[in-house]
Image (cartoon, rainbow, N blue to C red):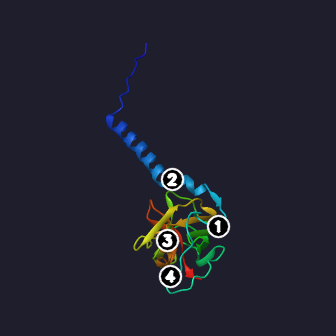
Amino acid sequence: MGRVRTVLVRPWVVGLLVVAVAGAGFGLYWFQPWKLWQDETVQEALPEAVSASKSPVPAPSGESSAPAPSGPVTLASGELVSHEHATSGKVRLVRLADGSHVVRLEDLDTSNGPDLRVWLTDAPVKEGRAGWGVFDDGEYVSLGKLKGNKGSQNYVVPEDVDPARYSSVSIWCDRFDVSFGAAELARA
């Protein structure tokens, strides 16, 4: 009869396999590479008003109280330029009839990614690699998670934020502190 041979697995081999599997799992979670092939398209209409309970914007003291426009008014706009990923589309800062403000992304086309946000910032837009990381250097307001990497969508500017203090919009990857694309807002 043949001898049965016992194979002993060395503890360092098991430890190495555990570290490799844990590292691969963490890398997949952190980078989420599958998102580069997944598109999320969002098509939203421009809202008439953000909140029906808001009162009209009062005229500053000393000015006559002219009637507010009956529809949305574009205060500033710009074209998206590519940074970390190829990005295109238009950005508009819009005042709605009730006095509230939204940032509107139109015809957006960018890569999907982990933890993408829409930021209203005071940073100048720089082309190419020079513009990748400038938007968190100054003042910025996060308007929320990017709803989709393609399409047209709206982001409400909080009531306590003065949009006149900000000059650009960035599609910002919060996980890697890098801009996917941005637009300089030119006043209308």
Residue 20 lies in quadrant: top left
Q: Amino acid at mark 3?
A: Leu
Which of pointers 3 and 2 lies earlier in the amino acid sequence? 2
**Residue 47: horizontal and vertical position, in percent?**
64, 65
Q: Nearer the viewer, residue 49 or 28?
A: 49
**Residue 96: horizontal and vertical position, in percent?**
60, 71
Q: Residue at x 58, y 59 (%)?
A: 147
Q: Residues within 10 Å of mark 4 (few under 14, many from 20)?
A: few
Would you say residue 28 is visible in this rendering?
Answer: yes
Q: Nearer the viewer, residue 8 or 43?
A: 43
Which of pointers 3 and 1 lies earlier in the amino acid sequence? 1
Distance CA(mark 4)–CA(mark 1)? 23 Å
Q: Secondary structure at mark 2?
A: loop
Image quarter (top left, top right, bottom left or bottom right) of the N terminus: top left
The residue under label 4 is 60
**Residue 171: horizontal and vertical position, in percent?**
52, 67
